[in-house]
Amino acid sequence: MNLRANSNQQKRKPAILLEDVSLVHRGSPILKDITLKVDIPECVTIIGHNGAGKTTLLKLICGLIRPTRGKVQILGKSLEGKTTLLQRRLAFLPQDVNIDPRMPISVEEVVEIGRFGKAWFARKSPDDIRVIERAMEVTGIVDLRRKPFGLLSAGQKQRVALARALAQDASIMLLDEPLSNLDPQAQEDICKAIDRIYESQRVTILLVTHLIEKIPQSCSTMLRMEKGRIVGEIKPSSYTYRSPTESGATPEPDHLR
């Protein structure tokens, strides 16, 4: 992410643009004076401890939360007013896959939800089939397509969730802690899947995580977030771990996480 855009970049509207954005909840500042620009296509990682405001920032970008102050633009358009059409350009992958594991649904049907919403049984056009197949191929789950979703491992479920988001055919993907609570091999698989998505689809990706040691190679830009602020750009080799107590992080309200 270039904080100073050159003349060519200025002619092209960024995928995500935040200017002096702040969020206050019940008198407490949650996000503070955030300015962020993510170009098309670009893969950016935001690093920060739990409670730094990362999840709240993603929810604000996709329109689930309104800022108290500042400007938010997606693909050059403001999120003010009706945002349904604009939000379709965004695919948000939350930390938890909200599908009941007891539900009798296959992997392929879960991916189809990303294409059709809740009506995964909708009639598929040739283009729908192509998008769904490509999403499963890029995320490496073609061999799991007939398997019940509830029988998958945590890492496999996360790859299915990535495929579901990809099937939405959005221009921007927002990934909230996609590597959390996974074993090292599953984390590696997710990183490789994100790299394949970025390289093959050329979508804009904004990923937030607290795991500095596991970052997809496509995400060449890393920003540090502390206490609701983006405090600068960092390099993996220069990052020094500090515990949440040392950094002074405070938890976000439950409904903002």
Image (tube, rainbow, N blue to C red):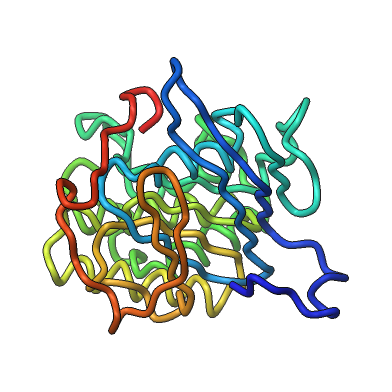
- Left or right of residue 151, residue 192 in this image: right
Residue 203 visible in image: yes
Q: What percent of the width, then of the height, locates residue 146?
A: 30, 53
Q: How many marks?
A: 0
Q: What percent of the width, then of the height, locates residue 54?
A: 40, 46
Residue 148 visible in image: no
Q: Residue furthest bottom?
A: 237
Q: Is residue 158 above or below residue 135?
A: above
Q: Residue furthest top?
A: 26
Q: What percent of the width, then of the height, locates residue 97?
A: 31, 40
Q: Is residue 109 above or below residue 1?
A: above
Q: What percent of the width, then of the height, locates residue 64?
A: 55, 30
- Residue at 64%, 70% in the rendered image: 3
Quadrant (top left/top right/bottom left/bottom right) for the N terminus? bottom right
- Left or right of residue 144, residue 14 in this image: right
Quadrant (top left/top right/bottom left/bottom right) for the C terminus? top left
- Residue at 34%, 45% in the rendered image: 52
Toward the viewer: 191 or 14? 14
- Left or right of residue 90, residue 207 in this image: left
- Residue at 32%, 55% in the rendered image: 48
- Left or right of residue 203, residue 101 in this image: left
Residue 183, quarter of picture: bottom left
